[in-house]
Each structure stands twice: as C-alpha cells, then as structure tokens.
Amino acid sequence: MKAYHRLDIAMQWHKKLKRCEKTFELGFYNMYNRKNPFYYYIDSTYDSNSGKVTNKLMQMSLFPILPSFTWTYKW
C-alpha cells in the first residue's frame, strides 16, 4: 500500500465566567486533503472489439478535509 499520512489540527478557547466555563474548539481532520488509501480493488473492463479484458488496480479513499466545531458549557 502507499504511505498513509494526514495532519489533524485543533484549537481551543476557554472562557471562565462567574458560574460557568465555556469551551470552544475548532478542528480540521486531514488538513492536507490528501487522498489516503482506505482499500484497493481490481476494476475489470472488457473491450468487445479486441475481446480482451483489462484489469486495473484502483484505490478507494475516504474522508477529505473535515472541519469540526465544538461548544461545551460547564456549570
């Protein structure tokens, strides 16, 4: 398999109030938007003119760059 690599980044901000604490988080999964291999499969195509079958190894990739936002409120 090809090398698998990704960069995940997250930042948090904390705000304390008299009775509670708020936390905000902004994050990004796979910041490079790299097409990492999840699995491989063989794609077969038939050429009716020549009567030959061509096999090609294909890669399935999941999860491009995914942002996330979280807000937490504690009493």
Image (cartoon, helix red, strand yellow):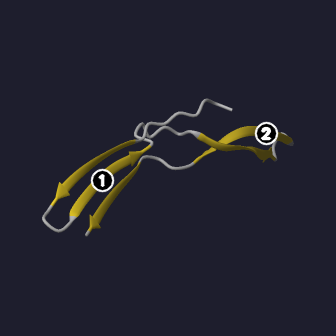
Q: Nearer the viewer, residue 62 or 68?
A: 68
Q: Nearer the viewer, residue 72 or 21?
A: 21
Residue shown at 68%/44% (left/top)? 39
In the rendered image, the quadrant that contains the C terminus is bottom left
Tell me the residue that label 2 is attached to: 55
Give yes or no for contact between labels 1 and 2 (Cβ–Cβ under 8 Å): no
Position in image of residue 25 (x %, y %): 30, 53
Position in image of residue 35 (x %, y %): 53, 40
| Residue type at numbered disc 1 | Glu
| Residue type at numbered disc 2 | Asn
Q: Residue furthest left?
A: 18
In the rendered image, the quadrant that contains the N terminus is top right
Position in image of residue 48 (x %, y %): 82, 47
Residue shown at 17%/58% (left/top)? 16
For label 2, the SS is strand
Tell me the residue that label 1 is attached to: 25
Question: Taking 69 as reference, is 48 left or right?
Answer: right
